[in-house]
Amino acid sequence: MNRLRLLWDSSVGKKVVMAVSGLIWVAYLVTHVLANLLVFQGPGKINAYSALLRGTGGALWAPRLVLIGALVLHVIAAAQLTGRGQEARPVAYAAGRRPHASTLAARTIRWGGALILLFLVYHVLHFTVGTAHPDFVEGNPYQNVITGFRDPVVVLVYLVAMAGVGLHLYHGVWSSGRSVGISPPSPRPLRRSLALVLALLVWIGFSIIPIAVYAGLVR
Ligand code: HEM
């Protein structure tokens, strides 16, 4: 227990916690995007997949609790690391901060994370609880996706959020590899191929769903 405490108290330990909790969410997102792409095959498969998960009854709460726990640890560690950074450097650099390699994804990691958190609350109310959905039908995710993306504002919210998720993943996956010591330092962003592939899969895979539904390609 003492070792866990020591790990949590150190900055490196918090980065490892961020890496592991982030990767749990990456695994969920890859599964979630592949499951959602079943929408292109009509209502049968996606609704059956949802029914299968729900059919496990209370057992569905085990992975849910893992995801919630990972999210809470990820956000607390991020806030504490940001706080430590500000305490260590309360006065800004006179000539601006010049990081080793700066990408849009790295510069937006904190605001992007906050935006994703807000999106997640809206998303669960939209497609799981249904209170933020105009025409929610319990147990029929296919129908909920089709009617949910009729509104162009909702489509826009999802597209902005998915761009945020893609950017967050691109920087997060690469830097978590750095924290646990598996990615070499890379000043050239294009060498971060695993992070790029995952980010593109999640960004494009999710984004084509609201676009296709709004364009009437999936009804
Ligand atoms: C266009 C993008 C997305 C679509 C169409 C979509 C669709 C859905 C649908 C239909 C459900 C309800 C499933 C069911 O009732 O069986 C759901 C649940 C959920 N989604 Fe998404 N999703 C998208 C993006 C995301 C993203 C980016 C995240 C995370 C950042 C996310 C996290 C979740 C979570 C946590 C749940 C609740 C799962 C549960 O009930 O335990 N989704 N999503």
Image (spheres, rainbow, N blue to C red):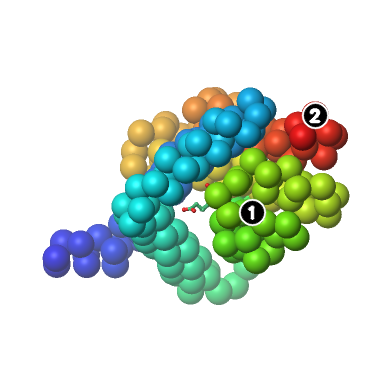
Q: Residue at x 85, y 34 (%)?
A: 215
x and y percent of residue 182 in the render? 36, 33
Q: Quadrant of the N terminus?
A: bottom left
Residue tagged 1: 137
x and y percent of residue 92 in the render? 63, 68
Residue 217's label in the rendered image is 2
The amino acid type, in three-letter code, at marker 2 is: Leu
Q: Is residue 89 visible?
A: yes
Q: Is residue 97 above or below residue 46?
A: below
Residue closest to the eye, 88 or 150: 150
Q: Crowding near pointer 2: few (<14 within 10 Å), some, many (20+)?
A: few
Q: Secondary structure at mark 1?
A: loop
The amino acid type, in three-letter code, at marker 1 is: Val
Q: Residue at x 64, y 41 (%)?
A: 142
Q: How many marks?
A: 2
Q: Is residue 171 left or right of residue 149?
A: left
